[in-house]
Image (cartoon, rainbow, N blue to C red):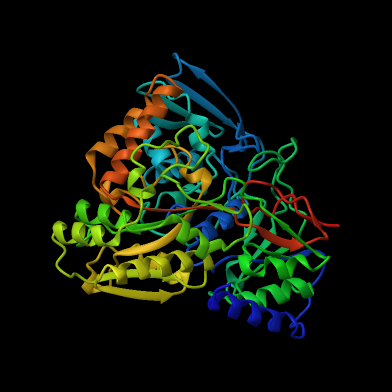
Amino acid sequence: MSLRRRTLMQAAAATLAAPSISRAQSGSTLKFVPYADLAVLDPILTTNYVTRVHATAVFDTLYGLDEKLTTRPQMAQGHVTEDEGKTWKITLREGLKFHDGAPVLARDVVASLIRWSKRDAFGGALFAATDEISAPSDRVIQFRLKRAFPMLPEALGKPTSYYPAIMPERLASLPATTQVKEMIGSGAYRFIAEERVPGALAVYRKFEGYVPRPEPASFTTGGKIAHFDRIEWRTIADAGTAAAALQAGEVDWWEQPNIDLLPLLRKSGKIKIEVIETAGLIGQIRFNHLVAPFDNPAFCRALLGAVDQREMMTAVAGNEPGIWRDRVGIYTPGTPSASEAGMEILTSKRDLAAVKKQIEASGYKGEKIVLLAGTDVPRISAICQVMADVCQKLGLNLDYVATDWGTVIQRILSQKPVAEGGWSMHGIFSGGLDLASPAYHLAARGNGKAGVPSWLTDPKLEELHDAWFVAPDSAAQAKIAAQMQEEALAVGAYVPCGLYYQPTAYRSDLSGMLKGLPQFTGLRRA
């Protein structure tokens, strides 16, 4: 065990022995510890997973995915297609309401989807194939397409970032780059803005006007039932304090316990340890391709040859059996898009001396490299520490900025030069569903400033991305996905860091925990 891990275990054990700080309010309140603070509320403005979990409580979507990854209607009652799949008419369920009491109308949906399409890869592909989206009546949304787009329901029901949340037209009419601050959705829980304490607390209340579907809940589909009157998100940065609070019953659910603390938590007879994000989490070191030296593909590619995924994942998950894997490309292992194409850059023997020569040949002139590390998210902190060590061994001019994750996700929105408060690299993890195919994958794009904070411009990647959506069959799609991986690795789009499965921990008197991603509907106290 490393000194860092041993110190953490000792500190956690001491904290766990400390007296309890407060007791849960009542059986009608769920206390949840998110992995980081809810710094951004708008699910169209960020890919941050804290925001997505928030969005699944506050907002609903037209369609959703069940546990078998089958797309099913959610806010939609159903749809019909005409003109050989070029016209789609989607009918809303009756009685849907927003949290302010206004009915959910088709024009709200139209405005929401247009805004979402400006940010999301899947949404952008759908709207590129769309001639017109309209609301011919209060309950009908109509797509008139340039060509058939059979995956339309899959796009409108994606549970990944960016989340296709439906909000009132007056909010959805804001530009996709402007943050919506008023959280009005039609989901099972209402966000209570007046109780928000940045860095500490977010509060939700059961929405009595929510109309659930009659089917059983499964992933993001079916009857989303709110059994708790109140949910409190308690941001606790210190892992030992969070573990102690969970053991003492002061909180009910810790979203992402530190891997080092799992043995201690398992000793309790009142805590369940479970993996609910069964597609895993995949680490990435993303580059800012707008600034030197990351505006040079030769430099970016050289760095890919220096990183060891085993070292990355060991730093994240240690020796916990079966919890991580290396040799991971840009797509989630086991999915139809995953392949070995171009993987030599990641799987060949690491040779830092050779990488130094490649960096020198790329023309690197000693530019400052600002690496943003979210220290309050252990997995992100771990891969950033490994990346920093690699940079130092390569003799790069590194400025390692250790700060909280909320600050990181706000700072990476800046496209300013490094000298003006910009950045060069940051660590992040994406869920396996987010990287399952080109339809979802946001970082394997070459759409420049229209993309996620990374902003790579690569016409070939964009051509391949567009071709994937019109490929005639799954074999053709797999071939294009392999070509996209080759191109992404060749230009150094980002560093894939490996995959691990993050357990969650919750009190054993809770039942109804859904698989797929953290959600609050269905949960009840026994």
User: In this orientation, which residue lies closer to the viewer: 96 or 518?
Assistant: 518
How many numbered badges does the structure rendering display?
0
Measured as percent of width and height from the top left, residue 296 is found at 19, 55
Residue 178, quarter of picture:
bottom left
- From this view, report whether residue 45 is shown above or below residue 223: below
Q: Is residue 39 above or below residue 277?
A: below
**Residue 289 position in % (x across, y down):** 25, 56
Q: Residue furthest right?
A: 526
Query: Considering only vertical position in the picture, is 296 above or below 418?
Result: above
Q: Is residue 320 above or below residue 372?
A: above
Q: Is residue 123 visible?
A: yes
User: Residue at left 17%, top 70%?
Assistant: 366
At a point 48% along the width and 45% down the height, the residue shown is 434
Q: Is residue 326 left or right of residue 286?
A: right
Please indicate whether residue 514 sits to the left or right of residue 336 in the image.
right
Residue 83 in the image: x percent, y percent? 44, 14
* Closer to us: 173 or 152: 152
Image quadrant containing the N terminus: bottom right
State the residue at coordinates (52%, 46%).
432
Write down the quadrant of residue 57 in the picture. bottom right
x, y percent for residue 303: 29, 57
Is residue 99 among the parts visible in the rendering?
no
Location of the C terminus (image quadrant) = bottom right
* Residue that sits furthest to the top in the current view: 84
For residue 184, side relative to residue 213 (left or right): left
Along the viewing direction, whichever of 306 and 519 lies nearer the viewer: 306
